[in-house]
Amino acid sequence: MTRIKCCGMTRVEDALLAAQLGADAIGLVFTARSRRRVSVAQAQAIVHALPPFVSTVALFMDDAPALVEEVIATVVPDLLQFHGGESDAWCAQFGHRYLKAIAMGEGAAALARLRDYPRAAALLLDGHGLGEAGGGGKAFDWSLMPRNLVQPLVLAGGLHAGNVAEAIRVARPWAVDVASGVESAPGIKDAGKLRDFIAAVRATDEGEGTP
Ligand SMILES: O=C(O)c1ccccc1N[C@@H]1O[C@H](COP(=O)(O)O)[C@@H](O)[C@H]1O
């Protein structure tokens, strides 16, 4: 089964709908570089409303350690996600499980960086360029997704209900991650797009017999 992370939640009702529809994880963006940035209070309201067994992921991009520590202490996310130029040692300093995003904007050359994060719980390949923020709907060449890594791989960047089936067939990811493809505006999820996206992932799994 392909796991589904819906990122950039800012409203309790959107996060609850995603959970009800079968999302496995909810992403909360804390970096100031995002139009989906949430406050600690907003994030706490979302986390406390979620049913059990839905994971929460706190997203940062070259942010100060103090912000990461504050979010760990107050929001208590299950995982951290780092989108900038952070090193493996920097990401690991918090003693919290983390995902490291790899900017795939430069194509195959970016794959060399996948080996730089041995402590990451998973690697998230996103379509944006190095140094650019994610969440802008940029896809990359899914055939570049490696098959020989020990860590689980998350596919992100420009996914939506209309292309996620093809993306899964080509990239064979552990999980997919979506933000703008299920929105009506940054941080505002569209119920229909969310429903269609999750249904498309599940239909692909069923059609292919993905365990
Ligand atoms: O969502 C953001 O605003 C964001 C900001 C800075 C770094 C990463 C961000 N989002 C991540 O990018 C992926 C892909 O987004 P999209 O589906 O292409 O819009 C998203 O899932 C987040 O993990």
Image (cartoon, rainbow, N blue to C red):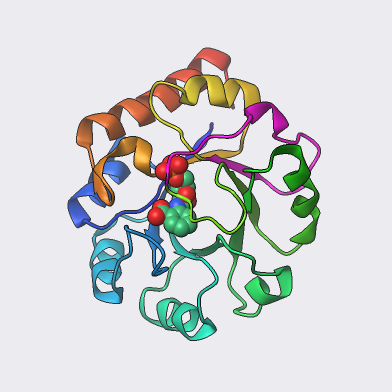
Magenta region includes residue 144: yes
> Can residue 53 be seen here?
no
Figure check: 88 above or below 201:
below
Figure check: 58 above or below 3:
below
Residue found at x 24% / y 75%: 41
Q: Which of the two residues, 17 or 129, is positioned nearer the viewer here?
A: 129
Residue 77 horizontal/vertical position (percent): 43, 67
Residue 93 horizontal/vertical position (percent): 65, 80
What main secondary structure does the magenta stretch of the protein show? loop
The image quadrant where one finds the N terminus is: top right
Residue found at x 22% / y 29%: 192
Figure check: 33 above or below 21:
below
Residue 20 horizontal/vertical position (percent): 27, 41
Q: Which of the two residues, 53 or 80, is positioned nearer the viewer here?
A: 80
Residue found at x 50% / y 40%: 157
Figure check: 14 above or below 98:
above
Residue found at x 31% / y 25%: 196
Residue 30 horizontal/vertical position (percent): 39, 68
Left or right side of 69 for 188: left
Q: Where does the magenta region start and end?
A: 136-156
> Can residue 65 be seen here?
yes
The image quadrant where one finds the C terminus is: top right
